[in-house]
Amino acid sequence: MKNLVVYYSRSGNTKIVAEEISKIIECELEKIEFLNDIGSVRAAFTSLIGCKARIKHLNIDPKKYDNIFIGCPVWAGKSATPMNTFLNNFDFTNKNVFIFITQADSKTPVKVYESISKRVADKGGNVADMFFVQTNMKSLISSQQAMEAATEWINKLRLK
């Protein structure tokens, strides 16, 4: 099975988790890039009202992959706007999708999972599993903490 990790990260936490997942399952890693980077207050507001963002074109052929891992931070209780754009534009037909979230809150981001899952299903994909990593808004997650969380999750999935 061929895997791909696609992520958006503003502060760097989701990037660290994505890199660890990519190392563990030995797969390609693609970063979603925001074309108009904005401040954290505006980012939270645009996410809250469901805006999409202009992102750099990703040259990904969905047909090459069986499993797609998608990761993003939570902004104001919603998925980050660059991820919203990716979800609306990507063809998930017949793909197993694994969602990973980073957020400061310790509560499971059920509404974010539901929102992303619906959009993946609307694009023909199947959400196979999801998990989140609690981070700190004031500092980056350590590679060790990200590796431990990602390893536990990946081992549960039995992909390797």
Image (cartoon, rainbow, N blue to C red):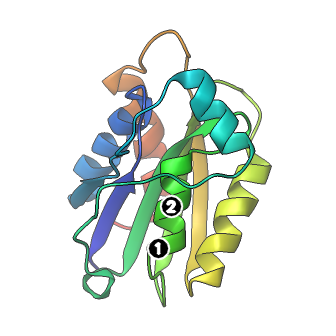
The residue drawn where x is 25% and y is 73% is 60
Residues at discs 1 and 2 in contact (Cβ within 8 Å): yes
| Horizontal and vertical percent position of residue 132 | 59, 42
123 or 108: nearer the eye?
123
Quarter of the figure with the N terminus: bottom left
Residue type at tag 2: Thr
- Residue at (64, 62) in percent of width and height: 116
Q: Residue at x 65, y 32 (%)?
A: 44
Question: What residue does disc 1 label?
Answer: 89
Asked if 114 appears above or below 134 in the picture, the reply is below
Image quarter of residue 130: bottom right
Task: Determine if residue 147 is in view.
Answer: no
Which residue of the protein is positioned furthest toward the top in this rendering?
Answer: 138
Residue beneath the point at 41% across and 46% down: 8
Q: Describe the element under mark 1 as helix, strand or loop.
A: helix
Height in image: 79 above or below 118?
above
Classify 10 Å Cα crowding around label 1: few (below 14), some (14-19), many (20 and above): few
Q: Name the residue carrying label 2.
A: 85
